[in-house]
Image (cartoon, helix red, strand yellow):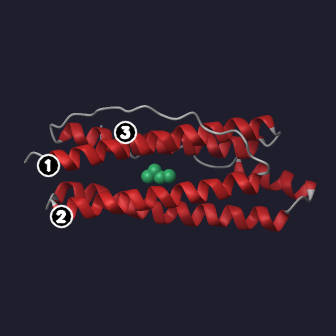
Amino acid sequence: MAMKPKLVDAFNAQIQAEFQSAYTYLGMAAWFTENNLPGFAQWMRIQWQEETMHAMKLHDFLHSRGESVTLRALVAPSKKYSSAVQVFEQVRKHEQSITASINDLYELALKEKDLPSQIVLQWFINEQVEEEALVMEIIERLKLVGSDGPSVYLLDRQMAVRPTPTTGTTA
Ligand code: OFO
């Protein structure tokens, strides 16, 4: 069954939002590298991969429904951060806005009675709960270590230990 044009448009907007997340996190990865925190930089690079996979999951879903993907322009990420905590506060805000857009998209899929869209979006709803919790945990850890050099060093090493994402696309 074909998707409603309004729903296709909203999926395309979400694809843009996911690619924008990826690009934003790649900018943050560069900031961490340039501020001598390679473990945090590695974590952000993994996050960049995860967001790219999220975008591709939606991208491939539209194609599997016989719909058209329209890629949109991305905005250059900021590199004006004053601390690691501030970077992660930005991540938290960003993820909260992504959660809101996923929820809106799900509401639209409900309204349009599009069951396959609802099912694919349920995966994203769960993913957002996990992502927001993970980011909160990192913020708490960063606040705990403060500016204590050896603790920051250890935390940076822990951040580097994050498995590369291997699933998430439907292609
Ligand atoms: Fe960070 O979230 Fe995608 O969806």
Q: Pick whichever, 62 or 10, lies toward us.
A: 10
Query: Considering only order in the chain, which callout, 3 or 2, is on the residue closer to the N terminus?
Result: 3
Disc on res. 87: none
Which residue is situated farthest in the left direction here? 1
Q: Is residue 92 above or below residue 13?
A: below
Give amino acid for label 3: Met
Indicate the position of residue 75 as horizontal and vertical percent values: 52, 35
Give amino acid for label 1: Lys
Q: Which residue is mark 3?
A: 56
In the rendered structure, the answer to whether residue 28 lies left or right of residue 74 reads right
Query: Considering only order in the chain, which callout, 1 or 2, is on the residue closer to the N terminus?
Result: 1
The answer to whether mark 2 and mark 1 are in CB contact below 8 A is: no
Q: Quadrant of the C terminus?
A: top left
The answer to whether mark 2 and mark 3 are in CB contact below 8 A is: no
Query: Considering only order in the chain, which callout, 1 or 3, is on the residue closer to the N terminus?
Result: 1
**Cα distance, mark 2 to mark 1?**
11 Å
Residue in the image at 21% along x and 34% along y = 68
Q: Which residue is mark 1?
A: 4
Q: Pick whichever, 46 or 102, lies toward us.
A: 102
Q: Which residue is mark 2?
A: 111
